[in-house]
């Protein structure tokens, strides 16, 4: 016959076991809540990053008309170019981060392959803030053949292109269209670091009424 003390001890053990099980259950519940919270937090962070990337990569365009600031720059071939000397036909200025940005140079190389610019009488001037040797090497690697105009930052600043990309002291990835009369009629910034040359040509021709 089971004694009263044995029954008591068995009861106490059961209470201890029940308490341990309850604590284990509570711990598992907390872990599940924590995992769900972390998963939700991670999901929200990913959504926020994707949303931020989509927003910041959207093109920005300015169609205000103004007299384009005149300038004179030398290019990587040693030729000097003066904007005012180009009156009579439109010039598309392409500002980019230059040698440190492969996609920027690829953009120029692909634009060169679009015959529509020349057919429409549009001259494209790529402008960078690089040393001649650096941009020449990068251009050769990407297959870009047009000489790059070398800017010390003055022209890029006058055209409001500094800080429009990833670096505050460099241009982003943008274009400025100067019409045949010497007026700036369009400016487009492309944080995604790319615009299809055919799309670019369509935009530019539209702004020129061609």
Image: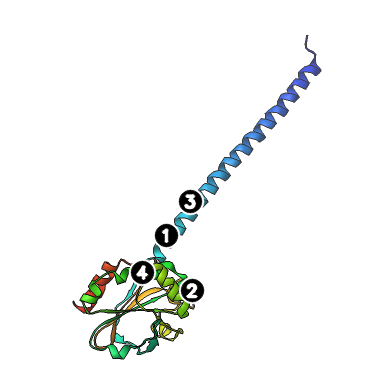
Q: Is residue 85 left or right of residue 159?
A: left
**Residue identified by numbered label 1:** 51
**N-term mark: 2 or 3:** 3
**N-term mark: 4 or 2:** 4
Name the disc covering residue 43, or none.
Answer: 3
Labels 4 and 1 touching (C-beta < 8 A) = no
Q: Residues within 10 Å of mark 3 (few under 14, many from 20)?
A: few
Q: Distance of mark 2 from mark 3, alpha carbons?
A: 29 Å
**N-term mark: 3 or 4:** 3
Which numbered disc, 4 or 1, marks the residue closer to the eye?
Answer: 4
Labels 1 and 2 touching (C-beta < 8 A) = no
**Residue identified by numbered label 2:** 167
**N-term mark: 1 or 3:** 3
Which numbered disc, 4 or 2, marks the residue closer to the eye?
Answer: 4
Residue at 37% across, 86% down: 79
**Which structural element holds mark 2?**
loop
Labels 1 and 3 touching (C-beta < 8 A) = no
Q: Quadrant of residue 207?
A: bottom left
Whether residue 97 is visible to the viewer of this picture, yes or no, is: no
Whether residue 151 is visible to the viewer of this picture, yes or no, is: yes
**Residue identified by numbered label 4:** 107
Residue sitting nearer the eye, 144 or 178: 144
């Amino acid at each position: 016959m089971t004694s009263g003390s044995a029954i008591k001890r068995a009861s106490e053990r059961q209470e201890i076991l029940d308490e341990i099980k309850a604590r284990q259950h509570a711990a598992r519940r907390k872990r599940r809540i924590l995992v769900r919270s972390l998963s939700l937090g991670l999901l929200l962070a990913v959504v926020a990053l994707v949303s931020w990337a989509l927003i910041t990569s959207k093109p920005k365009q300015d169609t205000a008309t103004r007299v384009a600031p005149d300038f004179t720059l030398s290019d990587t071939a040693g030729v000097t170019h003066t904007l005012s000397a180009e009156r009579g036909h439109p010039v598309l200025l392409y500002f980019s981060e230059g040698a440190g940005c492969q996609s920027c140079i690829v953009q120029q190389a692909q634009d060169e392959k679009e015959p529509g610019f020349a057919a429409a009488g549009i001259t494209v001037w790529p402008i960078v803030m690089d040393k001649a040797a650096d941009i020449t090497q990068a251009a050769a690697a990407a297959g870009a053949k047009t000489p790059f105009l070398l800017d010390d930052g003055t022209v890029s600043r006058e055209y409001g292109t500094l800080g429009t990309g990833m670096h505050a002291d460099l241009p982003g990835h943008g274009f400025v269209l100067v019409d045949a009369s010497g007026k700036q009629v369009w400016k487009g910034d492309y944080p995604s670091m790319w615009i299809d040359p055919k799309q670019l040509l369509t935009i530019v021709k539209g702004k020129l009424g061609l």
